[in-house]
Image: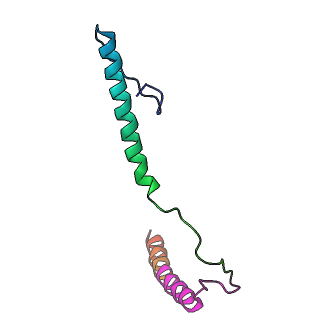
Amino acid sequence: MVKGTQSLLQVKYSNENKDEIISTLEKVKDFIIEKHQNETTFYQNKIMTKQIGEIKISDTPINQPKKKLIVAVAFVTGFILSIFLVFFLKFIKKD
């Protein structure tokens, strides 16, 4: 790969015989093209995502708020915070 690019491939080959250079570079080019075609056939065999039914929009929400759970958690949290507040106020009054 050429620095700064993601799609260019630079192939260097040095030899005194020009015919050998050309044949070697042709082999390299053919190898790269064959490898690329083999990698892309994997994706050609896959089925694209498609919609199999109609889109349905309901008026009722999927997740309704659980009021009893919210009240219970608020009560327990308030109780625990009040205990910590009592201990904190006692700590302040001792000084």
Q: Position of residue 54 (x, y in %)?
A: 65, 78
48 vs 8: above or below: below
Q: How many marks?
A: 0
Magenta stretch secondary structure, dominant: helix
User: Is residue 73 part of the magenta span, yes or no?
Assistant: yes
Residue at image location 32% in from the left, 16% down from the top: 21
Is residue 39 shown left or right of residue 85?
A: left
Looking at the image, the residue that sits furthest to the bottom is: 68
- Residue toward you, 71 or 64: 64
Looking at the image, the residue that sits furthest to the top is: 16
Where are the magenta residues, as a range?
58-81
Residue at image location 31% in from the left, 22% down from the top: 24
- Residue toward you, 34 or 74: 34
Give the colour scheme of this rendering.
Answer: rainbow
Residue at image location 29% in from the left, 9% down from the top: 17
28 vs 43: above or below: above
Q: Position of residue 1 (x, y in %)?
A: 40, 28
- Residue toward you, 89 or 47: 47
Q: Position of residue 14 (x, y in %)?
A: 30, 13
Residue at image location 33% in from the left, 13% down from the top: 19
54 vs 75: above or below: above
User: Is residue 63 part of the magenta span, yes or no?
Assistant: yes
Q: Position of residue 91 (x, y in %)?
A: 44, 72
Residue 26, quarter of the rendered image: top left
65 vs 26: above or below: below
Residue 95, quarter of the rendered image: bottom left
Looking at the image, the residue that sits furthest to the right is: 59
